[in-house]
Amino acid sequence: MSDHFNRCEKDLIDFIRSCKTLLSDRLPIAQLEEKKSLIRQARQYLDDISKLISDMEVESNKFGPNSRASMANKLKQYKFDVDLIKKDLKKVTDESTKYKSYQSINNENDPERNKLLQIHSSLMNTNDTIVRSTQIAIETERIGNSVLTELNEQGERLTNANEQLDDTKNALLKSRRILKKISMGAFYNKFLIFIIIFLELVALAGVIYWKFFT
């Protein structure tokens, strides 16, 4: 794997980590004007991330099939992370717009305003839970992908070692079985997360029904 690709990957990981921190830790507690600035900063991060991914795709095309497949697998995971960040940023932007609408209700003692604020708070809590649950599922899947990438690189180095070919094949078969177990574990984790999210949404619907119809 080339030094240029590795440098781009390091910068990409730093940008993704910074963007996630901004969305999960700083934006939720920011005031309106600061939130606007942080949203602009997140968009700049995404622009830089897109440029790095493009450079890495160009660099990966310079290598043979095995190395290119390993690089492509990494890029696929990074693009998935970027898509999640874009979705989270859109949610924050939409919520910021809704918050401005709530502020337009000047009477703090208005029961309707209080109900809207309570619903907004419940939605924010639910969104935070979804984000945390999604991150757990992503980390679990990332572990499996990292193991698979390492195995691909090892397989490329061992192709010239004819004397150890049989041992290598056996090791790869065992590793694939382990990866299947990891993938199944990730699937069950995601399924459990979706059940939790569904239950929270049902509970939220109950709160809304109780606030407006009882």
Image (cartoon, rainbow, N blue to C red):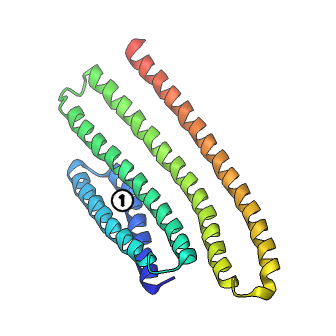
> Nearest the camera: 167 or 202?
167
Relative image position of residue 101 (x, y in whole percent): 21, 33
- The residue sitting at 22% across, 53% down in the picture is 36
Name the residue furthest top.
214
Is 94 left or right of 11, judged from the image as shown?
A: left
- The residue sitting at 37% across, 29% down in the picture is 119
Is 112 left or right of 168, judged from the image as shown?
A: left
- The residue sitting at 23% across, 48% down in the picture is 32
SS for callout 1: helix
Is 69 left or right of 54, judged from the image as shown?
A: right
Determine whether 190 is above or below 172 in the image.
Answer: above
> Nearest the camera: 7 or 38?
7
Is 176 left or right of 113, judged from the image as shown?
A: right
- Say which quadrant the C terminus sits in: top left
Q: Specify the quadrant of the image occupied by residue 120.
A: top left
Relative image position of residue 27 (x, y in whole percent): 33, 53
Relative image position of residue 168 (x, y in whole percent): 77, 77
Label 1, residues with CA under 10 Å away: few <14, some 14-19, many ≥20: some
Determine whether 80 is above or below 5 in the image.
Answer: above
Amino acid type, residue under disc 1 in the picture: Leu
Relative image position of residue 134 (x, y in whole percent): 52, 49
- The residue sitting at 59% across, 42% down in the picture is 193
How many marks overall? 1
**Residue bearing mark 1:** 22
> Nearest the camera: 121 or 151?
151
